[in-house]
Amino acid sequence: MTDHAPSERVSSEHTEIWTGRARNRGQWLLACGGAACLALGIDLAVEALWPSGILPLIMSIVGCIAVGLLILFGTLAFVHVAVKVDADSLEVRCGHIGVPRRRILLSHVVGAEFVPAVTPRHWGGWGYRWRPEQGTAVVVRRGEGVVLMLGDGRKFTVTVDNAEAAVRIIRDRLRTAGSAPA
């Protein structure tokens, strides 16, 4: 029996799982701004006595806390993205708790494309984005990405390191699924 290197092994099933990540360290700066707004709201609630009345104080506290929470959680959700391609799907998880999350079955994918330069400018910023002419995207930083063409005509884009390997694996699985007997 001949022993093959792991890259040369041939199997009838796809058991390999590809994972990739992308990070945006700049989002931490925005998260710090959100934490500062939150701290200001808490400080106002604990220590401030406004001579003009209680209503302006309450409005300031609620405003600072709300803005701080929105900025803090909105940016922390897109500090990084984790992409996993397994035998039957592509899964995208954002942030430290994995929300928002998107799972696309490979049976719904008709094509995959490597894009060397995805930029937040083309999508209107960082985060989970939708544009009528471009589809849906998860953009956490500028750089390489994967574009999936779905069977219903929509597109899904995600920025991830080593996107070229992900596209190669997806295309291989699509070819294998297309040639499998029904």
Image (cartoon, rainbow, N blue to C red):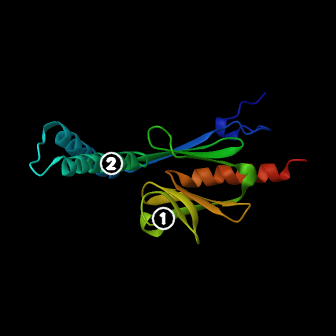
In the image, is 143 to the left or to the right of 115? left
Crowding at dot 2, Cα within 10 Å, few <14 / some 14-19 / many 20+, comes out as: some
Mark 2 lies on a secondary structure that is: helix
Q: Position of residue 107 (x, y in %)?
A: 75, 51
Residue occupying the point 66% across, 64% down: 154
Q: Amino acid at mark 1?
A: Ala
Task: Report the residue marked by disc 1.
Answer: 117
Residue extending farthest to the left is 51
Amino acid type at image mark 2? Ala
42 on left or right of 6: left
- Specify whether 127 is left or right of 154: left
The secondary element bearing badge 1 is classed as strand
Image quadrant where residue 150 sits: bottom right
Which residue is nearer to you in this view: 105 or 166? 105
Residue nearest the observer in this picture, 128 or 162: 128
Mark 2 or 1, which is nearer the eye? Answer: 2
Residue 178, visible in the rendered structure: yes
Give the percent coordinates (x, y) of residue 105: 70, 48
Q: Position of residue 18 (x, y in %)?
A: 60, 42
Vertical arrangement, residue 102 with respect to residue 110, above or below: above
Marks 2 and 1, Cα distance to the nearest angstrom?
35 Å
Which residue is depicted at the point 20% across and 40% down? 45
Query: Is disc 1 surrounded by few (<14), some (14 to 19) or many (20+) residues within 10 Å?
Result: few
Q: Which residue: 48% across, 46% down? A: 81
Whole-percent x, y for residue 87 in the image:
71, 41
**Tags 2 and 1 touching, CB below 8 Å:** no
Depth check: give the residue in front, 155 or 73.
73
The picture quadrant where one finds residue 44 is top left
Q: Is residue 28 visible?
A: no
Q: Is residue 177 left or right of residue 81?
A: right
Residue 66: give its label. 2
